[in-house]
Amino acid sequence: MSEVITYQRDKIDYIFLNRPNSGNCIDETMVDKLLEIIYDIHYKSDSKLVILTGEGLKYFCTGGDLKTILKFKDDCKGLETYCLKMCEVIYRIAMLPQITICYINGFALGGGCELASAFDFRFANHNAKIGFIQGQMGIPTSWGGGTILREKMNHQEWITLLSSSNIYTAYQAKKLGFIHELCKDFISLHNESFISLARSIPTHIHHQNKKIVTRKWVQERLKTRMEEEVISALPLWFSEEHLKNIEQFTKKLEK
């Protein structure tokens, strides 16, 4: 079965991360598939909205696939390519002309929060848990997510999320401004008044509205700044501290 499921219905493109038994973490295959899907949505789709979520009830996305990461221990160029591809995914989502929404249906950890940062709106299940836990793992944000999120949040809330490395409840994340609305479940998401209103607006209006911000991001070299975040983090990926924390985190997931 595909690691990413996608379909369109009622002018909405849906994307499901489909590795629930692995925390919907992102391996090389998923990165390539996401790049392909986002490209097609940008240039070939007539949708008004894009909604991404995780398959299953427990995980939205737990970041990078740890087996994939450890495979690059003696392959720094391979790690750089993997991280820059994921940075490209996050950037392309941010630059989509459609209104973008992610529904955090469970745990969003580390790179999963970076992925969520790309979206215009972040909705969450009441039981979701959100954590930029990179700091606890011994690395900073590494896919450009810290840079894109700073474009969307004020400094105090942004630095609180990144530098506390805490895992927040959905309610706490909403108070900090990372989550915009709480939803009972994925079906309830479609009853949100904003989504209903957005679907009634002509597609070209959404595209023109998004151009106002994406034009600014191009002028301010957002992609280059995101890539600089990736490159500056690379030397820390295989520090003794990070490797030890990866081992401990893997044991927690296996329980």
Image (cartoon, rainbow, N blue to C red):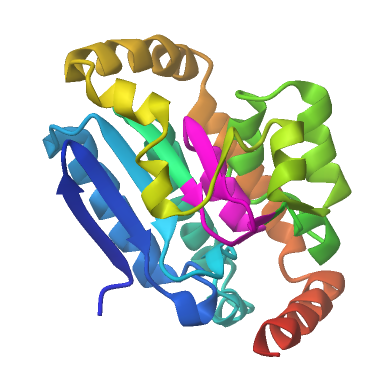
Q: In the figure, residue 43 lies in which quadrant?
A: top left
Residue 21 coordinates in the image, percent (x, y): 48, 82
Residue 54 coordinates in the image, percent (x, y): 44, 62
Q: Decide whether residue 236 is among the magenta residues.
A: no
Q: What stretch is highlighted in magenta?
A: 103-129
Q: In the figure, residue 135 lies in which quadrant?
A: bottom right
Compared with 41, 56 (above or below) is below
Compared with 233, 16 (above or below) is below
Residue 153 in view of the camera: yes
Residue 11 horizontal side relative to residue 104, left or right: left
| Residue nearest the observer in this picture, 92 or 19 | 19
Residue beneath the point at 68% across and 25% down:
153
Residue beneath the point at 35% across and 41% down:
190
Residue beneath the point at 67% across and 28% down:
150
Q: Quadrant of the C terminus?
A: bottom right
Residue 172 horizontal side relative to residue 70, left or right: right
Residue 36 coordinates in the image, percent (x, y): 24, 53
Residue beneath the point at 77% across and 51% down:
168
Q: Quadrant of the N terminus?
A: bottom left
